[in-house]
Image (spheres, rainbow, N blue to C red):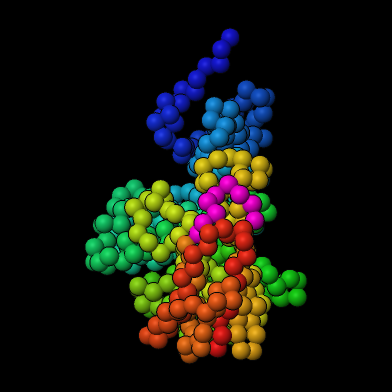
């Protein structure tokens, strides 16, 4: 007997690859019932969400083996992540009390294997007496910018265009999400290949020696290895206290400001999200206008290097962004950036390995926070023109790399 098509396969054929399974606890689960598998409601309740996710995942994989599904589920237990599930923190209230636990929820879920835990940006469940809170919406949108999924959702007025009192600020926040696509896609690779969560606690890289140092810090986190986010989560606040973990941290908003092993009060009016890069970090960014992710071109990137006195390295991941087997089949490319600072210069090497993506790259190597213009810049031993803007300040070095798997060497001479 021929296999029957999936009941909703025609929607997938038309381009739908995201499926939302709501109320999967299940929300109504009478204690007296017994399931077809013989288990009582009490025995099966926590595992029910996993089974629902598994069925969708396996049938989708069988019917569309080379297409990546996005399965949104809000319920399940240990192991849910194996079914390509993007969970969220359920119907959280549109209130500051609903907003404030979201960092902790993402951290705890990520450490439990659910690396894509997110939240209804703006809050879902409304108080009829106060449906709208523009300040809360903007602060929540800023948190969503550095969450595994940025998705507004509510019983009412969820869309950014309802908050016109902030001008184009909502649009600018959302556009910033597109700019971070290459960094975020590499975080997805780290999750798929190593199980690393996207959202990581401050003590994640410090070992047992400082295990308890950040116990009272519940509103800051690492976004990957090299970025620290400190969202403003209190009503009416225009500043906040920020604790800096080990190492030197560069203020992405004002790159000339650096902090190390200290706690400060940071000025953060409504348009400012406090965000910091680890000194020595390479942050790849797509600094061009996109209407949707289909406009993303990984072969044209800005590589922002936050210069340091210490050696550092970073690996950028890229593949065709569609196929399911790019990791297992080796159809991907890893691009390694290595910085070697010296007394009077800094050498940066760029070298790829692998295949499956175009070898030619158009990069702009950008070094913000340099107070003094370098005396010269060399690429592969040849002196090249540089663009140094003292007003920011930032050094920009255009790079055309014909074969990324060949080593490119950049030397910045003080």
Quadrant in which the N terminus is drawn: top right
Which is more toward the observer, 113 or 304?
304
Q: Which residues are magenta?
A: 353-361
Residue at 34% x, 52% y is: 291
Magenta includes 268?
no
| The C terminus, quarter of image | bottom right
Q: Residue at x 60, y 85 (%)?
A: 345
Residue 273 image point, x, y percent? 42, 72
Residue 33 falls in image quadrant:
top right
Which is more toward the observer, 163 or 84?
84
Residue 119 visible in image: no
Chief secondary structure of the magenta portion? loop
Q: Of residues 91 and 299, which is closer to you in this image?
A: 299
**196 or 238: nearer the viewer:** 196
Q: Residue at x 51, y 42 (%)?
A: 322
> Eyeballing the image, is 199 above or below 295?
below
The answer to whether 132 appears left or right of 369 in the picture is left
Is there any visible trace of residue 311 in the rendered image? yes
Tell me where residue 144 appears, x and y as whole percent. Answer: 44, 60
Percent x, y of residue 209: 75, 75
Q: Residue at x 55, y 74 (%)?
A: 379
Coordinates of residue 94 in the picture (x, y in percent): 38, 57
In this rendering, the answer to whether 308 lies above or below 409 is: below
Judged left or right of residue 400, residue 152 is left
Residue pushed farthest front? 382
Image quadrant of residue 338? bottom right
């Amino acid at each position: 007997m021929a296999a029957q098509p999936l009941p909703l396969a025609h929607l997938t054929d038309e381009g739908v690859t995201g499926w939302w399974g709501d109320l999967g606890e299940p929300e109504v689960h009478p204690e007296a019932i017994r399931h077809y598998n013989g288990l009582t409601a009490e025995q099966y309740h926590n595992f029910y969400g996993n089974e629902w996710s598994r069925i969708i995942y396996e049938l989708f994989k069988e019917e569309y083996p080379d297409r990546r599904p996005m399965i949104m589920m809000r319920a399940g237990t240990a192991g849910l992540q194996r079914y390509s599930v993007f969970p969220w923190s359920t119907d959280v209230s549109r209130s500051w009390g609903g907003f404030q636990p979201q960092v902790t929820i993402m951290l705890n879920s990520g450490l439990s294997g659910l690396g894509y835990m997110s939240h209804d940006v703006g809050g879902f469940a409304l108080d009829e007496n106060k449906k709208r809170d523009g300040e809360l919406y903007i602060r929540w949108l800023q948190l969503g910018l550095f969450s595994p999924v940025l998705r507004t959702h509510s019983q009412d007025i969820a869309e950014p265009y309802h908050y016109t009192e902030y001008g184009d600020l909502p649009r600018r926040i959302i556009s910033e999400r597109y700019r971070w696509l290459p960094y975020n896609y590499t975080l997805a690779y780290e999750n798929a290949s190593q199980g690393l969560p996207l959202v990581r606690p401050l003590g994640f890289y410090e070992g047992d020696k400082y295990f308890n140092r950040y116990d009272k810090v519940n509103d800051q986190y690492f976004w990957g290895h090299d970025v620290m986010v400190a969202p403003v989560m209190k009503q009416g606040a225009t500043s906040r206290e920020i604790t800096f973990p080990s190492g030197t941290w560069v203020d992405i908003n004002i790159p000339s400001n650096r902090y190390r092993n200290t706690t400060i009060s940071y000025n953060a009016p409504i348009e400012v999200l406090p965000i910091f890069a680890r000194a020595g970090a390479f942050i790849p960014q797509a600094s061009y206008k996109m209407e949707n992710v289909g406009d993303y071109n990984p072969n044209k990137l800005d590589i922002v290097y936050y210069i340091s006195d210490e050696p550092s390295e970073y690996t950028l991941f890229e593949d065709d962004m569609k196929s399911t087997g790019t990791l297992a089949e080796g159809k991907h490319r890893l691009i390694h950036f290595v910085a070697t600072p010296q007394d009077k210069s800094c050498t940066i090497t760029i070298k790829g390995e692998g295949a499956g993506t175009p070898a030619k790259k158009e990069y702009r190597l950008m070094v913000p926070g340099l107070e003094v213009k370098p005396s010269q810049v060399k690429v592969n031993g040849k002196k090249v023109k540089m663009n140094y803007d003292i007003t920011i300040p930032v050094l920009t070095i255009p790079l055309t790399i014909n074969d990324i798997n060949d080593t490119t060497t950049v030397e910045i001479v003080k």
